[in-house]
Amino acid sequence: MSADASLRRPLRLASIAAFASIASMRACDPMLLALAAEFGRGLGDVSRVVSVFAIAYGALQLFYGPLGDRVGKLRVVAFACTGCAAAAALAAFAPSLEMLVAARALMGATAAGIVPMTIAWIGDSVPYEQRQETLARLLGATVGGMVVGLWFGGWITEVLGWRHVFGLLALVFAAAAVPLWRRPLADRAGPGDVAPSGLRHLLRLPAQPRVRWVLSVVAIEGALMFGMLAFVPAFLGQRHGLGTGAAGAVLALFGVGGLLYSRVARRLLRALGERGMAAGGGALVGIALVVLAWAPHWAAALPACLFAGAGFYMLHNTLQTQATQMAPAQRGSAVALFACLLFLGQSAGVAVVSIAVDGGAAAWAFTACAVGLALLGGVVSRGVGRGADERTASGTAPPQ
């Protein structure tokens, strides 16, 4: 572990919370048919359990960032875990679809304070030269949550029922929340004096050139990657005749690729450096997505999704590390904005790619996204170099 001994336990607890947060985000995807059958509603109606979570998760970033800068990031994570545990318990016992939708909105609103604030806390607590490796460890937890939410969420729904999924999530959130509240929650101070906080100061952050660059790049990254990823299962079904379950399992290999990256991040970082990670990750995800788009047999989608996940997280983890350093005095607000722009980019990307998919041009849309991500890797690689020059000039560069 790259963090020192005093940080290992809170990092482990925050990673458990991050795992549950992302698992809860994806857990409803495979249970929509079960919900439609139980409540006697159409798929479009029950899909609100997914959309309200997403809307609340994105909107509340603007609240948690300034709050984390004011009261401490870990304290916000502990509060958010408590709220998620309560919301998951409410969902497990929801007597109607409307109550379930309300519980999911509450879950999204509280889950929004976990991953970004953990990233910001790592930025405060871990030296820059160790930060990307530590963030890769956290990445393993979040991607693991995505895989578990998709795979095991569907399995538990089929075998035990969808209410058990929320019951298990409530237990996991509580397992992180209780020890977080019981330990001292004083965050290690960031650089400088007490940071300005509040929505007004948060909205001023994009006036800084470095912040504006990172936010712009992550919005484009989110649009290109997640705009097409949402349509991969449908594409595999239409092009190769895969069933819903099989297509979802293939897509889950994207998360497995991220997990594999998280395990070798230290060696990759030493071999390639930040700039090589960004350029290499962009190239790898671009090649993999082209293979996915044009391969004549569905079996090629297996390694394609795996390598696309590894390449994307090589690129994204590098950009995430930059986000922790773009405004150190307001790190919580800065990382919250980063998450918000990633989320907005995803939403815009889905809307644009859906037009191509409806027009029968999914493979060409995937190819355009692949090329864009490969080019973006080069842009991030050059931007990382400029960021290092700026830190050196300002005296904040990590020791060599």
Image (spheres, rainbow, N blue to C red):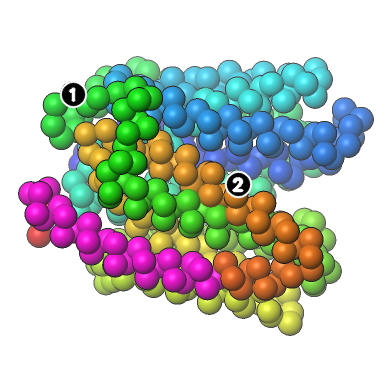
Comparing 363 with 98, the one in front is 363
> What is the quadrant of residue 315 in the picture?
bottom left
| Above-or-below relation of 397 to 160 | below
Q: Is residue 376 magenta?
A: yes
Relative to 161, is 87 on the left or the right?
left
Comparing 147 with 281, the one in front is 281
In this view, the residue farthest toward the front is 207
Q: Which residue is mark 2?
A: 347
Q: Residues within 10 Å of mark 1 (few under 14, many from 20)?
A: few
Query: Magenta region: which residues?
Result: 370-396
Quarter of the image where the C terminus is located: bottom left
Comparing 94 with 274, the one in front is 274
- On the image, the x and y values in percent for residue 260 come to 46, 62
| Residue 102 visible in the current orientation | yes
Find numbered disc 2 in the image and state the secondary structure of the residue it sits on: helix
| Residue 285 visible in the current orientation | no
Find numbered disc 1 in the image and state the secondary structure of the residue it sits on: loop
- On the image, the x and y values in percent for residue 330 come to 27, 33
Number of marks drawn: 2
| Dot 2 and dot 1 residues touching (CB under 8 Å) | no
| Above-or-below relation of 380 to 323 | below
Amino acid type, callout 1: Val
Q: Which residue is mark 1?
A: 194
Instruction: Say which residue appears at 20% left-offset and 29% top-offset.
Output: 188
Instruction: Say which residue appears at 79% left-offset and 72% top-offset.
Output: 239
